[in-house]
Image (tube, grey):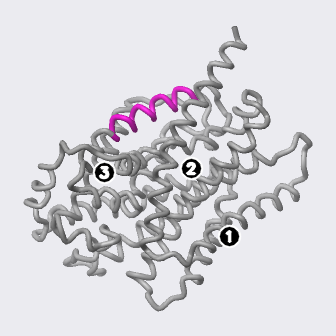
């Protein structure tokens, strides 16, 4: 049985990974069109969604979505739903993986073959995402313990650097009351989406009780503000649009004095490579669990059959990633934008489904 602190680890991992993903790009593209206001709205909505979702899923202790949906929803609806959401988690991990392959080729090893890099990552991810949920949570806690100080150090170095221009930040804040659009809201709320991994990880939580949910809202707000404003402080309100991976460009601009490694980029890359791979492992672990729930039969199957089933699903996930490796940065960004919007509506639909299941269980109890 997992303790409640592991839920905070899932949330923190998802929140931090958005610093390098599509979230800063989408917000910066709308820096004059309500991005700051969307961050404020997303903080309220994200915190509210976390509270509602955790209260509802706590009514089903030790159960994942397959165990909740199978007895409570129509049989013809359950399997397509589980396959659809397994696909969403596959894409969530896939876009993170593809982004980091592009970052590796762009900043670290431009002469390497993209297939060599992505296959190396895929082998590690496919092996690790088959671990049991509790082991992954233990590993996630250790990874955060190692990488979080490095990320905080990088942020502090960025904010205290004399090249950081506070005037650019103040200029952007004058656009705070501009009306946000759907895309900026979808991007900002993704920072709060770590809770949705309970779709499978709830199997190891029994009676999840969160205290001080507002802390998650504050943490998410701070991460979003840092994600959005720090690159603007370095590159200005106009020049920032020329950078694809704004935070890696920012890290590459920071010099570390009196240290073995002079460029902040390498420390930042190590921290986020580790965190990105763990994020993909977690997402594919959830996707694997949902897919297995969709194709499982009532008859008990041997361990060998289960292993073959897992590897076939992971080969399918890997095939999706390999089929998208040809995409350039603009097509990848477009894929990420579509994912962010579909994911947001999917989250709201999941909360509605959980509420329906809870009501059905309560009526049966009465």
Looking at the rendered image, the quarter that the C terminus falls into is top right
Is there any visible trace of residue 149 in the rendered image? Answer: no
Give percent across and percent down for residue 143. 48, 59
Residue 208 shown in magenta: no
Q: Is residue 264 above or below residue 3?
A: below
Q: Can the viewer see residue 98 in this picture?
A: yes
Instruction: Give the x, y percent position of residue 210.
Output: 46, 30
Which circle, 3 or 2, is nearer the viewer? 3
Q: Nearer the viewer, mark 1 or mark 2?
A: 1
Residue closest to the eye, 83 or 30: 30
Q: Which residue in the structure is indicated by mark 3?
A: 224
Find the magenta span and give its range.
42-57
Which SS type dominates the magenta stretch? helix
Query: Separation of disc 3 and disc 2 at Cα?
Result: 24 Å
- Residue at 39%, 55% in the rendered image: 16
Q: Nearer the viewer, mark 1 or mark 3?
A: 1
Label 2 crowd bin: few (<14), some (14–19), many (20+), radius 10 Å: many
- Residue denoted by label 1: 319
Q: Position of residue 97 (x, y in %)?
A: 53, 68
Residue 282 quadrant: bottom right
- Label 1 crowd bin: few (<14), some (14–19), many (20+), radius 10 Å: few
Image marks 1 and 2: residues in contact by CB distance under 8 Å: no
Element assignment for label 3: helix
Please tell me whether residue 278 is drawn above or below residue 162 in the rendered image: above
Distance from label 1 to label 2 (Cα)? 26 Å
Mark-to-mark CA distance, 1 and 3: 32 Å
Q: Which mark is residue 85?
A: none
Please name the residue that numbered disc 2 is placed on: 137
């Amino acid at each position: 049985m997992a303790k409640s602190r592991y839920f905070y680890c899932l949330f923190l991992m998802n929140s931090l990974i958005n610093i390098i993903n599509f979230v800063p790009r989408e917000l910066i593209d709308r820096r004059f069109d309500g991005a700051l206001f969307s961050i404020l709205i997303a903080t309220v909505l994200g915190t509210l969604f976390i509270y509602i979702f955790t209260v509802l899923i706590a009514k089903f202790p030790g159960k994942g979505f397959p165990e909740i949906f199978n007895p409570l929803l129509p049989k013809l609806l359950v399997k397509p739903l589980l396959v659809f959401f397994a696909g969403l988690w596959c894409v969530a991990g896939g876009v993170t993986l593809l982004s980091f392959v592009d970052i590796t080729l762009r900043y670290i090893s431009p002469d390497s073959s993209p297939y060599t890099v992505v296959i190396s990552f895929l082998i590690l991810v496919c092996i690790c995402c088959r671990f049991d949920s509790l082991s992954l949570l233990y590993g996630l806690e250790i990874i955060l313990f190692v990488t979080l100080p490095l990320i905080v150090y990088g942020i502090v170095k960025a904010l205290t650097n004399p090249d950081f221009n506070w005037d650019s930040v103040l200029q952007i804040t004058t656009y705070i009351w501009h009306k946000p659009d759907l895309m900026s809201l979808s991007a900002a709320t993704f920072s709060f989406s770590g809770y949705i991994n309970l779709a499978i990880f709830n199997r190891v939580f029994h009676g999840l009780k969160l205290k001080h949910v507002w802390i998650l809202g504050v943490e998410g707000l701070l991460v979003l503000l840092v994600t959005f404003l720090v690159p603007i402080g370095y590159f200005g309100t106009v020049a920032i649009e020329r950078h694809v991976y704004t935070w890696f460009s920012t890290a590459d601009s920071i010099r570390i004095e009196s240290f073995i490694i002079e460029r902040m980029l390498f420390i930042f890359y190590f921290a986020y490579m580790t965190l990105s791979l763990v994020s993909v492992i977690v997402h594919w672990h959830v996707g694997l669990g949902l897919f297995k729930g969709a194709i499982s039969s009532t008859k008990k199957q041997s361990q060998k059959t289960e292993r073959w089933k897992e590897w076939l699903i992971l080969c399918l996930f890997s095939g999706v990633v390999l089929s998208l490796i040809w995409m350039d940065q603009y097509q990848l960004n477009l894929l990420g934008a579509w994912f962010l919007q579909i994911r947001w509506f999917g989250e709201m639909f999941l909360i509605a489904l959980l509420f329906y299941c809870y009501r059905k269980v309560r009526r049966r109890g009465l």
